[in-house]
Image (tube, rainbow, N blue to C red):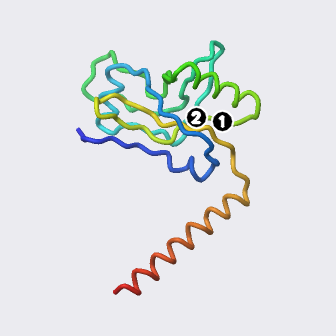
Amino acid sequence: MQKNINIKNKKARFEYELLDKYTAGIVLAGTEIKSIRYGKASISESFCEFNERGELFVINMQIDEYSHASHFNHKPKAERKLLLQKRELKKLYKEVKASGLTIVPLNLFLNDRGLAKMQIALAKGKKLYDKRESIKDRDNKRDLARIKKSFNN
């Protein structure tokens, strides 16, 4: 079992322009948290949605089945409820409904008390030319780092 779990969604920063970030708790079953503690989770294809009662759920999050569980194991791709304060939920709901923004998970981690938390962001989709600009900036940073490294040696 790993000490610090930090599962990232690397595609989110490339595909979306992040506006606001929030940290949310997750409602999990016993076998789900055990799988997360072993690092057997993925949030790369997941997104967040509100249901008809105004509750926020993470959809398409993959948590592998716990290997030492009996027949009481969980479903790997079940919807999982996110826990935020009521005013944060209202603000997010209003932003999503009014301006067509989306909520994407950025990071799944365990806090110092051993509870699973998820960092989510209110995001706007990038256009193709924005993605090209991101690639160009990343390449320029990499080239600059190489030049600095060769100059220092």
Residue extending farthest right: 98
On the image, the x and y values in percent for residue 93 come to: 66, 25
**Mark drawn on residue 133:** none
- The local secondary structure at tag 1 comes to strand
Give the residue at x 46% y 75%. Answer: 145
Give the residue at x 58% y 30%. Answer: 48
Residue type marked 1: Thr
**Mark drawn on residue 102:** 1
- The local secondary structure at tag 2 comes to strand
On the image, the x and y values in percent for residue 151 come to: 41, 87
Q: In this view, does 2 lie above or below 152?
A: above
Residue 129 position by quadrant: bottom right
Among numbered discs 2 and 1, the one appearing first in the sequence: 2
Residue 76 position by quadrant: top left
Circle 2 sits on which residue? 47
On the image, the x and y values in percent for residue 144 come to: 50, 77
On the image, the x and y values in percent for residue 126 come to: 69, 51
Name the quadrant of the N terminus.
Answer: top left
Give the residue at x 40% y 37%. Answer: 41
Name the quadrant of the C terminus.
Answer: bottom left
Residue extending farthest top: 53
Count how many numbered circles sit on residues in the image.
2
Q: Answer left or right for 47 relative to 2.
A: right
Q: Residues at badges 2 and 1 in contact (C-beta under 8 Å)? A: yes
Residue type marked 2: Phe
Disc 2 crowd rating (10 Å Cα; few below 14, some 14-19, many 20+) is some
Disc 1 crowd rating (10 Å Cα; few below 14, some 14-19, many 20+) is many
Residue sitting nearer the eye, 47 or 77 = 47
Give the residue at x 70% y 26%. Answer: 94
User: Nearer the observer, disc 2 or disc 1?
Assistant: 1
Residue sitting nearer the eye, 99 or 108 = 99
Q: How far separated are the C-alphas under marks 2 and 1?
A: 8 Å
